Image (cartoon, helix red, strand yellow):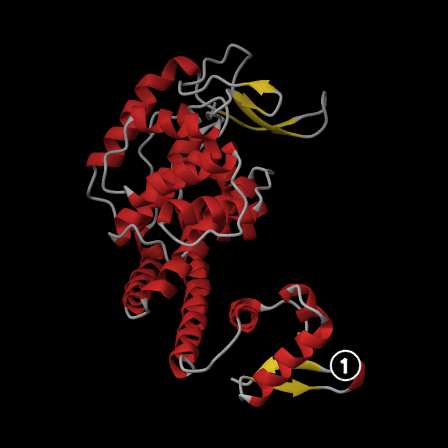
Amino acid sequence: MKPAYAHLTDDWPNYRWDHESLADSLSRIHFRRGELIAGMANVGFEMRQEAILRVLMQDVTGSSEIEGEHLDERQVRSSLARKMGLPFAGLPVPEQRVEGVVEMMLDATQRFDQPLTQERLFGWHNSLFPTGYSGLYKVNVAGWRDDAQGPMVVVSGRLGKETIHFEAPAADRLPKEMARFLEWFEHDSRMDSVLKAGVAHLWFVTVHPFEDGNGRIARAVMDMALARADNTPQRFYSMTAQILADKHRYYRQLEAAQRGSMDITSWLAWFLNRIAAAITLAEDVIEIVRRKQSFWDQHRELHLTARQTKLINMLFDGFQGKLQTAKYSRIAKCSKDTALRDLADLVQKGILVQAGSGRGTHYLLAQ
């Protein structure tokens, strides 16, 4: 009888795939990654740091969102800014749980060249669950799961009518399984570096070594592998954000790859597709950053209020809806008369153009 799960086959963990079917996608991704990193090198330091901060925010908030946990974006930005030496005035003091996720992600990406060890994974796990609880439930923190409450399974559906999607290896296998995974991750240099990130994510989440937090740590391992592939701690694209955008297919691909066969061509094809989408989004961000930098280079001599400067940056970063006087008044926390004077001044200086009329009057960047 065919084993239900890949980790029960005789081939485990010898993953295989059709190299030829992935070759074109992989080649294009390597080329575009190189162009992206080179393009970012030509952007000013402050703008580059802002772009990196955006990507890390996507990684931190997105990885938790995949698991159904929403983190306050302002707290995430505050925690990242403090640790990266960037301005954080006006931002809230982050909660302990936010700090933990940020610390794990920064350790994985900023110290990508340091060995991934059991102790390091335990440290990440402790960062995720600093109180020893996941919600209302006590978690075995900084240690492999023990299956005291039964096998580790991934289920969906109502109580009593659950569908089992996956059952992880038994707890008594974990020391050997994780020793083998860590040995491969650190010392197998034969595999393409981008494909290795995809294999590492799948392999880790299949072993499911912790009682909770496996998905988030698997994605941190993935980001660490991608940082090694790029050979830089500076993250310019967010794979996690693209997983979140395609979450349902992500889970379907994982389930299919974990069942029966060691052929993971479909999983890796999906993984490469998501990296390509992440790079496309990063390329758009670079274009915005370049336009923003060019604007401030051209207008560095203009006298603008702090309110006006904040508004212009918001317009470049993706302003939601139409910019009208009342909305600017709320954003700048000023009177409508002051808002009207600020906007008229920006029009007179050629920075904004007025569109519409009457109640439909709104303003756009002249560029």
What residue does disc 1 label? Answer: 360
Out of 116 and 294, give the one closest to the viewer: 294
Q: Residue lying furthest right in this view?
A: 359
How busy is the neighbourhood of tag 1: few (under 14 within 10 Å), some, or many (20 plus)? Answer: few
Question: Does residue 30 appear left or right of residue 265 in this picture?
Answer: left
356 shown above or below 197: below
Q: Residue at x 31, y 56 (%)?
A: 20
Question: Does residue 14 appear left or right of residue 333 in this picture?
Answer: left
Q: Residue at x 69, y 64 (%)?
A: 330
26 shown above or below 91: below
Out of 239 and 297, give the one closest to the viewer: 297
Label 1: state its secondary structure: helix
Q: Is any part of residue 101 visible from this angle?
A: yes
219 shown above or below 241: above
Q: Is any part of residue 246 visible from this angle?
A: no
Q: Quadrant of residue 230?
A: bottom left
Out of 252 and 186, give the one closest to the viewer: 186
x and y, in percent, of residue 187 in the image: 19, 35
x and y, in percent, of residue 54 in the image: 45, 56
> Given the image, on which type of amino acid does mark 1 rest?
Gly
Out of 278 and 305, give the one closest to the viewer: 305
Q: Quadrant of residue 122?
A: top left
x and y, in percent, of residue 245 in the image: 55, 53
x and y, in percent, of residue 353 in the image: 61, 87
Count of residue discs: 1
Question: Does residue 157 appear left or right of residue 273 in this picture?
Answer: right
